[in-house]
Image: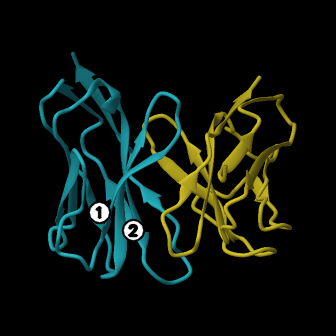
Chain colours: A cyan, B yellow
Amino acid sequence: AQTVTQSQPEMSVQEAETVTLSCTYDTSESDYYLFWYKQPPSRQMILVIRQEAYKQQNATENRFSVNFQKAAKSFSLKISDSQLGDAAMYFCAYRLSSGSARQLTFGSGTQLTVLP
Amino acid sequence: DGGITQSPKYLFRKEGQNVTLSCEQNLNHDAMYWYRQDPGQGLRLIYYSQIVNDFQKGDIAEGYSVSREKKESFPLTVTSAQKNPTAFYLCASSVWTATPTFGSGTRLTVV
């Protein structure tokens, strides 16, 4: 079974600074997707960024980028120029690319606080 | 606008009662999912469905039931067998190969 681990329950960052959230996962598969979701106080799950395992290039979405290390099974999220609106719970998630069990498996989350 | 609608936003259940949470989507997605969220535990999969009239148990299906009679709808029933139902419930849907889209959730409380 696949597992996703987020070892930082809480993180804080000063506004305009950079912060990195960690995620590791365990799988025996080679073809899968990794995601970072953001959950603000409204509790709506918002997709931040997605990475296909077969792509060596790290995904980037504006101020959000990932460091995907497939051999190490590591998938960290870097937020640059942090803004107050970035404050939220962040979840790392994994999903197989094919087969019948393509549901998302989530980590336990990292609560990010942005300090003004 | 296309999206996923969960209702109600807040739901209260008495001990021993069954309650049903609604999830409707107009995105023409084949796959639908139910997740439970407890503090500090992330999201755990309850049930998922790939097509109409078919669904599979997730990691924590005990005490829950679902149906998928229509493509647009995937209601979740929390039965009296679920001993600790107080939680936040999230529904999601996707085209089978795509990233799931989530609803806004239902907060269920046992009173």
Q: Circle 2 — which element?
A: loop
Residue B89, percent across and down?
63, 43
Residue A92, percent across and down?
35, 52
Quarter of the view holding residue B70: bottom right
Are the residues flagged by discs 1 and 2 in contact, CB closer than 8 Å? yes
Residue at image mark 1: A25
| Residue name at image x 29 percent, y 31 percent | A112
Count of labels shown? 2
Residue that protrudes farthest toward the top in the picture: A116
| Residue name at image x 53 percent, y 52 percent | B44
Q: Which of A47 and A95 is in front in this view?
A: A47
Residue at image mark 2: A2
User: In the displayed structure, would residue A1 be above or below residue B17?
Assistant: below
Residue that protrudes farthest toward the left in the picture: A17
Of labels 1 and 2, earlier in sequence is 2
The type of residue carrying mark 1 is: Tyr
Residue B75 appearing in the image:
yes
